[in-house]
């Protein structure tokens, strides 16, 4: 389905970033000399709002493109892939969770989970089976209900199911707790961590909330990568 | 889940905009098809009516005028031909048939054709489709009249109706003279033929000759007593009754002769046509026309109007393509986020491009199908209205080839209209549209 990079030499890591450079036109830069995340490892990307956390996650997902360096996911350098292959690779191996869920309105819960599976090349029956498994794991008992009719909590679980379905290697969560109160934020983080663990995926979650640090064994500061530059 | 589900969900999420856009395509397609159909139907209606006549002889100034006057009843022919001339032409060749006609009288504006019974039996207004009587029978005796379908409907004529004809084609107020002394009895009503003949009434030549002979006598007696004419009303004549036996050559006038050359069964053409046409043309006292050829020339002259029709329709179609484009561009602005989500879920730029083009193509397809349905209904309505209002009988059928071509054109234009928003989707910067809405 996707072309593996000939440079695959770091398949032991879920994510392995080397010599990455990215600059905004306004002079803001992200420079990552090396960052590795082991399979199934759960890491918090910490830093204040607007400090470049989302940009780094978008770079790892392949929706932003660095000027230099490599980003290996499960040994495949996504920077070296052509755009179309990069998109398919993302559909296959990288799940994303957003603060606002970014569900497809007008689609059912199951269809929301099926879309990335379809784009990754799974057959219709595989899509259905994998989507129903993921939704069941997250306790969604009405998979054919339109997402617009679900409660906020259920929508969040659909978004998590979509990110893990199909055996993703990496789950990137971009400020998923930013708009939640403390109790809900803690529950959400627990949900995402549990789902990623059961799916066998590495988790990199960004948050500006210092309280979140306690929930993670490892914390990476975004400022390590942006020191000396202006904010975006 | 497949691409089509994404497209359909996306259209359904904007039901109103999708329906309005498809409706615009439907109206444009329907309008184009109706225009095209009416255009061919109008020329078909003109081509009908000359029927199986090979040659038309009259004393009009030109062959085209002869055909328009003689077979489409545009105006009463100005000059008569003597019955002797008719007999001479009739006996000069073994015609399949030779039918004399005399035009000039009317009934409330509808032309009256005084002719021989063969007009209704041998002449076919459309080749292979002779006149048929809806009610009653053909005229046999003098002062019997058979009404064309439109004339009967327009004037409320039924079997047994008594009518008085007017000398001259116009209404009485325009100087016509009503033959009140000789009421005609309606004995038959024809089925529609889709030709100008539906507007006419048919009677035999003798009745017409008798009336005009009496009028001639009246005029002569008026001339003799013109000193006493002051104060007399126009209808207060000194009548002298004329019988068929009293008619002289001066009374036996006609205005046209329809001729048909014998042909083999199943064929409408004959090699003798050109020879006979040339032979008759040598007689300078008459005008000879090949009706089919004259109508062909007329259609060539007015052919440019066709382009006006087509140009109008194309402008309508293009303007609706622009509307689709605007509607799609507007919807794409609203859907940037959806496109960004699809991209982050693994859709390539090309995939979202093709989804957007598929969406506009689908709108074009649905609109085209609806347009074809509307056109079929619209043509049926237009056919009924034209037949009711102006007596023009059109077939009103949509040509399947036009329908397919116009639909394909509309679908291609819709697809093209989808390219601009698709290009916007293609170039959507994913990261910018995934952030929470402020």
Image (cartoon, coloured by chain):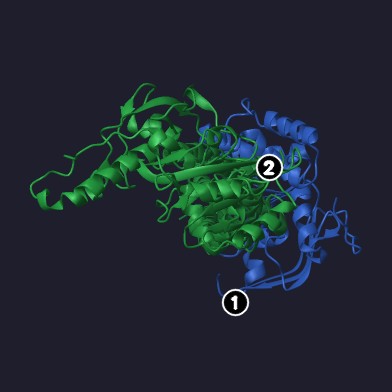
Chain B rendering hue: green
Secondary structure category for the residue under label 1: loop
Residue nearest the observer in this picture, B225 or A77 = B225
Q: Mark 1 and 2 residues: CB-CB less than 8 Å, in contact? A: no
| Residue density around tag 1, few if under 14, some if 14–19, many if 20 or more, within 10 Å | few
The quadrant in which the C terminus of chain A is found is: bottom right
Q: What residue is at 61 percent from the left and 26 percent from the top?
A: A142
Spot occupied by residue B53 in the image (x, y as percentages of width and height): 60, 46
The disc label shown at residue A25, or none: 1
Q: Nearer the viewer, residue B13 or A64?
A: B13
Q: Position of residue A23 (x, y in %)?
A: 65, 74
Rendering quarter of residue B78 = bottom left
Q: According to the colouring, which chain is blue?
A: A
Quarter of the image for residue B95 reads top right
Spatial distance from mark 1 to mark 2, Cα to Cα? 39 Å
Q: Is residue B121 above or below residue B106?
A: above
Question: Is the residue B204 above or below the residue B438 in the image?
Answer: above
Q: Does residue B326 appear left or right of residue A201 in this picture? A: left
Dots 1 and 2 on the same chain: no
User: Residue at coordinates 62% horizontally, 51% vertically from top-left?
Assistant: B406
Residue B222 in the figure: left or right of residue B429: left
Instruction: Residue under label 2, please give it.
Output: B4
Helix, strand or loop at label 2? It is helix
Q: Position of B183 compared to B302: left or right? A: left
* Residue A129: numbered disc: none
Q: Residue furthest left?
A: B231
User: To which chain does the residue with label 2 belong?
Assistant: B
Of residues B303 and B112, the one nearer the viewer is: B112
């Amino acid at each position: 389905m996707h072309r593996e990079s000939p440079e695959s030499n770091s398949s032991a890591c879920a994510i392995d970033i080397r010599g990455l450079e990215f600059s905004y036109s306004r002079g803001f830069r992200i420079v990552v000399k090396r960052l590795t995340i082991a399979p199934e490892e759960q890491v918090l990307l910490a830093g204040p709002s607007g400090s470049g956390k989302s940009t780094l996650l978008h770079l790892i997902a392949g929706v932003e493109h660095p000027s230099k360096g490599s980003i290996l996911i499960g040994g495949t350098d996504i920077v070296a892939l052509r755009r179309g292959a990069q998109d398919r690779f993302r559909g296959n191996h990288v799940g994303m969770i957003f603060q606002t869920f970014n569900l497809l309105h007008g689609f059912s819960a199951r269809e929301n989970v099926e879309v990335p599976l379809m784009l990754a090349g799974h057959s219709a029956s595989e899509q259905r089976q994998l989507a129903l498994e993921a939704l069941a794991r997250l306790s969604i008992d009405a998979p054919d209900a339109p997402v617009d009719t679900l409660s906020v909590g259920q929508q969040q679980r659909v978004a998590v199911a979509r990110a893990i379905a199909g055996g993703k290697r990496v789950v990137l969560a971009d400020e998923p707790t930013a708009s939640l109160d403390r109790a809900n934020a803690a529950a959400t983080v627990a949900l995402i961590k549990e789902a990623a663990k059961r799916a066998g995926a590495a988790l990199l979650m960004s948050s500006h909330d210092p309280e979140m640090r306690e929930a993670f064994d490892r914390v990476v500061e975004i400022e390590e990568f942006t020191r000396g530059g202006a904010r975006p | 889940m497949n691409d089509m589900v994404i497209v359909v969900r996306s259209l359904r999420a904007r039901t109103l905009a999708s329906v309005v856009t498809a409706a615009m395509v439907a109206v444009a397609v329907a309008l184009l098809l109706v225009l095209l159909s009416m255009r061919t139907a109008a020329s078909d209606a003109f081509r009908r009516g000359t029927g199986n006549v090979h040659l038309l002889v009259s004393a009009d100034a030109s062959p085209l005028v002869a055909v328009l006057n003689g077979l489409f009843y545009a105006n009463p022919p100005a000059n008569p031909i003597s019955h002797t001339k008719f007999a001479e032409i009739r006996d000069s060749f073994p015609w399949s048939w030779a039918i004399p006609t005399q035009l000039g009288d009317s009934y409330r504006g509808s032309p009256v054709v005084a002719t021989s019974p063969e007009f209704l039996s041998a002449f076919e207004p459309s080749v292979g489709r002779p006149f048929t009587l809806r009610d009653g029978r053909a005229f046999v005796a003098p002062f019997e009249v058979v009404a064309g379908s439109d004339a009967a409907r327009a004037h409320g004529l039924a079997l047994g109706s008594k009518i008085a004809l007017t000398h001259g084609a116009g209404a009485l107020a325009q100087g016509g003279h009503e033959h009140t002394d000789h009421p005609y009895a309606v004995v038959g009503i024809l089925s529609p033929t889709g030709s100008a003949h539906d507007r006419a009434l048919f009677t035999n030549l003798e009745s017409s000759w008798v009336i005009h002979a009496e009028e001639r006598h009246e005029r002569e007696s008026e001339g003799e007593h013109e000193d006493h004419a002051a104060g007399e009303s126009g209808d207060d004549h000194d009548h002298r009754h004329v019988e068929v036996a009293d008619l002289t050559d001066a009374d036996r006038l006609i205005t046209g002769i329809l001729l048909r050359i014998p042909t083999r069964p199943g064929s409408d053409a004959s090699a003798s046509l050109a020879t006979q046409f040339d032979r008759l043309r040598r007689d300078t006292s008459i005008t000879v026309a090949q009706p089919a050829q004259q109508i062909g020339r007329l259609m060539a002259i007015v052919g440019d109007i066709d382009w006006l029709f087509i140009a109008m329709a194309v402008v309508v179609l293009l303007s609706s393509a622009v509307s689709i484009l605007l509607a799609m561009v507007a919807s794409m602005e609203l859907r940037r986020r959806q496109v960004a989500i699809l991209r982050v879920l693994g859709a390539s730029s090309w995939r979202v491009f093709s989804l957007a083009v598929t969406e506009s193509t689908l709108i074009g397809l649905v609109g085209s199908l609806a347009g074809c349905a509307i056109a079929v209904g619209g043509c049926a309505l237009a056919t009924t209205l034209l037949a009711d209002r102006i007596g023009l009988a059109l077939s009103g059928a949509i040509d399947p080839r036009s329908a397919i071509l116009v639909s394909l054109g509309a679908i291609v234009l819709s697809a093209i209209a989808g390219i601009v928003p698709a290009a916007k989707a293609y170039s959507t910067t994913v990261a910018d549209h995934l952030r929470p809405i402020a």
